[in-house]
Image (spheres, helix red, strand yellow):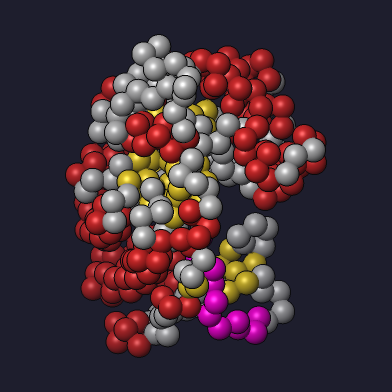
């Protein structure tokens, strides 16, 4: 008999070969609605059709509800007004001209605003069959950009180092506290602490390794340590070409990287597998744009087989798209081809499903 999804995923994280390569389906709400409609399936039936080995539980915001000005789509928990398509763009940068004292006196959110009361029951409802993702997404890098403005933040990293350090300290401290509350409430029902910070562009990291180690890595380590203290693996979503940062992520004990983008500089799959495949789980690698959106079911199956065969030896791989959310313009037939091809070619000879 084959493994459960949870057993399969945890074997991959342990760099052992399970019965087959685990699979991950992250999708935009728009794609999910389209796929449900085209396949005439409900949410759980669709997850099963895509062979998804993961389920996710999240805390619910229960804090103050601010009144929004005209043209504002929503306000982040850190007081940044945003508007536009999807998550939109920040309309203001509230701390762009702040002094260090003003940063410390800023109305930072209360971690108790996140309702964690249903987390454990929701996680346990899956009956131990699936790998459960939990914890706060914790995108403190993006929040700092929203609060300070990106160019302004880069300049202040050099001219007002202590000020930028303080912003990251407050942001990461909030997220650490929220996830600590989630994990305390969930007991041992969560398997993987899943966080996200996009640190790469198409051509390389968004900041130097030295700057990354100074401003970002200590806070990532606090989050990794928090997950490990609760017996969880820790996986981070990160877009772009961030290969030069991977050694430092291994140093702090990060267990997995999500949505590997092979079209970005330095993200060659063979090299990543050879250099880091025994130390880091890689999740993704099947190109969301050139393969899934622009391809055909036949070309998707061919490329999927190529990626899976490169990445699956020795475990440490989860098959999925190279973007955190499959976009609405992606043909459903191509997504089915990706997951079905992963199922067909992802069986391990020593532990057949």
Of 48 and 337, nearer the camera is 48
Q: Residue placed at 41% from the left, 54% from the top? A: 189
Residue 85 lies within the magenta run: no
Residue 275 is situated, as x and y percent measured from the top left of the image, at 26, 26
Q: Residue placed at 39% from the left, 85% from the top? A: 106
Q: Residue placed at 60% from the left, 83% from the top? A: 66
Q: Does 60 sit above or below residue 104? A: above
Residue 7 is situated, as x and y percent measured from the top left of the image, at 40, 34
Drawn side of residue 2 relative to residue 229, left or right: right
Q: Residue placed at 48% from the left, 53% from the top? A: 124
Of 22 and 252, nearer the camera is 22
For the view shown, which residue lies furthest in the top direction? 349
Of 186 and 206, nearer the camera is 186
Q: Quadrant of residue 153?
A: bottom left
Q: Does 296 sit above or below residue 240? A: above
Q: Quadrant of residue 112?
A: bottom left
Of 21 and 238, nearer the camera is 21
Count of marks overlaid on the render: 0
Drawn side of residue 297 relative to residue 162, left or right: right
Q: Main secondary structure of the magenta part?
A: loop
Q: Start and end of the magenta stretch?
A: 58-68
Q: Quadrant of residue 272?
A: top left
């Amino acid at each position: 008999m084959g493994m459960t999804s949870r057993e399969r995923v945890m074997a991959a994280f342990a760099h052992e070969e399970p019965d087959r390569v685990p699979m991950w389906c992250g999708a935009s709400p728009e794609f999910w609605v389209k796929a449900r409609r085209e396949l005439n399936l409900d949410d759980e039936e669709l997850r099963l059709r895509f062979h998804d080995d993961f389920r996710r539980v999240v805390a619910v915001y229960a804090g103050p509800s601010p009144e929004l000005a005209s043209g504002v789509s929503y306000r982040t928990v850190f007081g940044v007004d945003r508007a536009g398509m999807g998550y939109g763009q920040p309309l203001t940068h509230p701390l762009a001209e702040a002094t260090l004292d003003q940063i410390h006196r800023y109305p930072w959110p209360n971690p108790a605003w996140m309702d964690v009361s249903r987390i454990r029951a929701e996680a346990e409802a899956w009956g131990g069959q699936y790998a459960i993702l939990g914890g706060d997404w914790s995108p403190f890098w993006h929040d700092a950009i929203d609060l300070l403005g990106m160019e302004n933040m880069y300049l202040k990293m050099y001219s007002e180092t202590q000020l930028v350090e303080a912003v990251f300290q407050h942001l990461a401290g909030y997220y650490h506290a929220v996830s600590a509350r989630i994990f305390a409430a969930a007991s041992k029902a969560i398997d993987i602490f899943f966080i996200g910070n996009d640190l790469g562009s198409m051509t390389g990291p968004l900041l130097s390794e030295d700057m990354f180690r100074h401003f970002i890595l200590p806070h990532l380590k606090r989050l990794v340590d928090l997950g490990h203290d609760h017996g969880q693996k820790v996986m981070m979503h990160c877009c772009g070409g961030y290969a030069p940062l991977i050694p430092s992520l291994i140093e702090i004990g990060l267990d997995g990287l999500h949505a590997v983008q092979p079209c970005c500089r330095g993200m060659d799959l063979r090299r990543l597998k050879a250099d880091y495949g025994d130390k880091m789980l890689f999740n993704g690698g099947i190109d969301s744009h050139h393969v899934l959106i622009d391809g055909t079911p036949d070309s998707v199956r061919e490329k999927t087989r190529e990626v899976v065969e490169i990445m699956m030896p020795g475990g440490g791989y989860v098959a999925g798209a190279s973007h955190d959310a499959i976009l609405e313009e992606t043909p459903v037939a191509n997504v089915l081809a990706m997951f079905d091809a992963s199922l067909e070619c992802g069986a391990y000879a020593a532990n057949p499903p």
